[in-house]
Image (cartoon, helix red, strand yellow):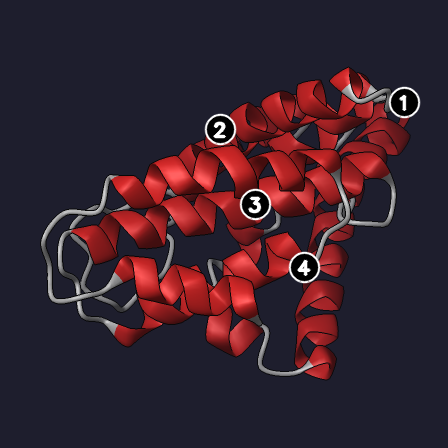
Amino acid sequence: MGIHTYFRSLNELERIIRCPGKFKFEEHSVSAHSWKVVQYAKTLADIEERNGVSIDWKKLYEITSSHDYGEIFIGDIKTPVKHSSKELRLLIQQVEEGMIEYFIEENIPEDFKAIFRKQLREGKDNSVEGLILEVADKMDQVYEAFAELQRGNTEKEFIVMYRNALVKIKNIQLHCVDYFLENILPDMVKEETPSSIDIKKITEEALAL
């Protein structure tokens, strides 16, 4: 019982593998994903600040570092399934939030419960910090899928993941998105190695949608 239970539970995120059930050259845990999302987000936020946008850094670090904590309870549900309909996505989110609330009620001391509810909440919203989290989360999907495609992994799910993540990113109105599309993504595509998958073509098609 107590905060020790929360700290110990973090080990479980190291054992939950993203995109389960598909062949991968590299496996990524949820904890590794969360760490990368924080790294992306802080640079994206720096870009926003350079363009005059005010950033709530405490909120940003809270929501990015904890955004997938609920997967301790439900695992990593495949993206095509999770996003197959708005209704299903909402139901999954409700289950996840309910289990987080139960965990807090059962394990977290009373004087810390409000803090944990705030930190473990769904962070993706229309605030600049919530939008940065959305971009950072999708960026990691882009990088994970790109690495598989670059090595010639022909699993269709990685093509879909790469394309859908790019489409989602380009439709978010942030300065850092413009920077990503104009400066970072071109450098990534230039790294394309000879393979049976035309990453440049997939990228161009996604950006044209």
Task: Tell me where residue 121 appears, x and y as whole percent.
Answer: 78, 44
- At a point 56% along the width and 72% down the height, the residue shown is 82
Q: Nearer the viewer, residue 202 or 95?
A: 202
- At a point 35% along the width and 40% down the height, the residue shown is 188
Question: Mark 2 vs mark 4: which is more N-terminal?
Answer: 2
Q: Amino acid at mark 3?
A: Asp
Disc 2 is placed on an element classified as: helix
Cβ atoms under marks 3 and 1 closer than 8 Å: no
**Residue 12 in sight here:** no
Q: Which residue is mark 4?
A: 96
Disc 4 is placed on an element classified as: helix
Q: CA distance from mark 3 to mark 4?
A: 18 Å
**Label 2 Cα crowd, 10 Å radius (few <14 / some 14-19 / many 20+):** few
Question: Mark 3 vs mark 1: which is more N-terminal?
Answer: 1
Q: Which residue is mark 1?
A: 111
Q: Amino acid at mark 1?
A: Asp
**Residue 121 in sight here:** yes
Question: Mark 1 vs mark 4: which is more N-terminal?
Answer: 4
